[in-house]
Image (cartoon, rainbow, N blue to C red):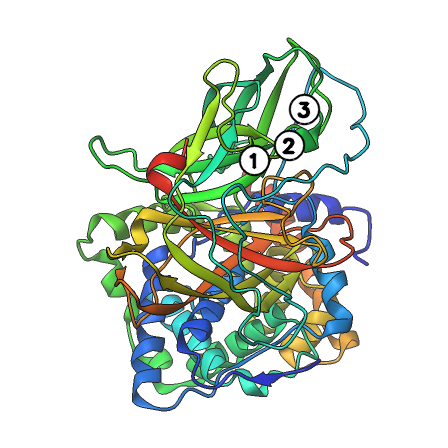
Amino acid sequence: MKPPGDEERWEKRFRAAPELLFTEELKERILAAARAESSQRPLRHTARRVPRRHLRGWLAAFAGVAAAAVMVAAVWGTGAKPGPPEGETAAVADGQAASHHVAGPVQQSPLMAPVPTGGGIRLKLAPLAVTNVKTVASTPGGPRDTVEATLVNTGTTTLQKQDVWGVLSFAPAAPGHGGIDWVTAVDGPDAPLAPGQSVTWSFRPATQSVPKDAKGNLVDAPRLAFYQSGMLNTGESGPSGDAVMWSTADVRASVTGLTVSATWSTGEAFVVHAEVTNNSDRPLDWSGVFAVIWFTDPKQPGVAFTAPDVPRFFTLVKGPLTAPDQLLPGETASLSLPLVGGPAANLPNLSAHVLLVDHSGAAP
Amino acid sequence: MGVTEWGADRDGAEALLASWMEAYGADVLNFAYSYLHNYHLAQDVTQDVFLRAFQHAASFRGESSVKTWLLSITANRCRDHLRSWSAKHELYTLDEQDPKPAAERTEQVVLDRIAQDEVWQMVLELPVKYREVVVLYYFRDLSTKEIAEALDATEEAIRTRLHRARSLLRQRMERDTREASW
């Protein structure tokens, strides 16, 4: 316990002091050196596996938490309390996602069934108008490290937090540069939002992989969209053109393990290990997809990542050394998907699932 | 805490290393800088720390946090450097004057801010044994128990050093205030 008194003044002054940023360049330099070292001698690396008795408590940290970042949802103009959670679940539209009990030993999952391919996943945009998306400073005089947006409920019913889920992505600011260079799942507003009511929503990415300049300012253009929890049935369309199709990669994918890599007071870093086989007759470019990882009760393997209160994580995919750019038809690769999550409520049981989604159509 | 051999899973190991850097890269870099007061040396030590952690993860028993463990390696590497012949003889700050590519120029902006920051300057003037405790406590938000683990000292010794460091910082601030009033 830190002593009180003028200690607060000290802490305030120290917190306001500038600090060096750990840049992507330095990270890549160290990774390159690590690759060079490990190619010269056998790697004797160990990973802290999650003991079964600890796993539930650990994964409890991720319930209802958006992926790869710490959500800072600031809601003004409403004092209403969040409503009770709904028990609704939704099924994957076109097939069964592969899954694996993260608590068990690393092994090939017997549930390695094909994930949805071809038609993809039909989603419905939430009745939330998203305007004034911008980057702002989370501290006075600090770097623009937070995304802020105005959300307006354009529907006819009050929206609860679990009614919606969102995608925040960053597109390179340079004109003519397609694609996205960072993506994460986000939650909706913390408090219920009545029809016509607006809130200011904000989100501060906690990982350093998000593109920033040397001062810590977010440098790329943020894009934000919210979807209704659950999915539309195949063939159903939204009443006003609000149905969206996410194309899934034609792959067979399964989660083969999970490793906690670091813990701190407000969250954990972990790596989801997955095995992916290209079922199509065309090479799969890693740069064109992002991974959707979600955790569910093993007794309900059909629960989709769009279901209410499902811990879901989105991340771009970095190709493994064996297939750094593309996965050729028929080939299999092991992916490591580093993620960061924060604390939240308990989950009764946990299975991990993974999908690869074509971000050209899915990113907002 | 169970530690399982990960064998030749290089991609997984690389992802683990990447996640450590994501979570603690800034901690290690800034802690190293507080010892060395040289950006390029701090980067080199940071690289060395993560590579050592990467290759010797088997020795990490989980008795302390990963952060404390990494900062402990950082302290040892920086102390080794400060004791080395090169640290006592090299004029390594000359490279700060060289023309730099754009990426390094933006880093230079941060370095300039640090150079002009009163708090950093006060901390950098402290003797190392007080400086390291102040940096870990205030900048890196470690408890005195964690600092004791990182610096291989007793918690009582850390509290004593922290108390002395506060006194030195207070004296420095009072001196600055007096000088400013003249």
Between disc 1 and disc 3, whose residue precedes?
3
| Figure quadrant of residue A277 | bottom left
Give the alpha-carbon distance from disc 2 to disc 1, as whole Å. Answer: 6 Å
Q: Nearer the viewer, residue A192 or B102?
A: A192
**Contact, mark 2 vs mark 1 (Cβ under 8 Å):** yes
Give the alpha-carbon distance from disc 1 to disc 3, as whole Å. Answer: 11 Å
* Secondary structure of the residue carrying numbered label 1: strand
Residue drawn at (64%, 66%), measured in percent from left and top? A101
In the rendered image, which residue does mark 3 sit on?
A75
Residue type at numbered disc 2: Ala
- Vertical relation: A70 (above or below) B166: above
Percent coordinates x, y for residue A284 in the rendering:
29, 55
Judge left or right: residue B52 versus residue A308: left
Percent coordinates x, y for residue B90 in the rendering:
29, 77
Q: Residue furthest bottom?
A: A41
Residue B31 in view, yes or no = no
Write down the chain letter for disc 2. A
Residue type at numbered disc 3: Val
Residue type at numbered disc 1: Phe
**Contact, mark 1 vs mark 3 (Cβ under 8 Å):** no
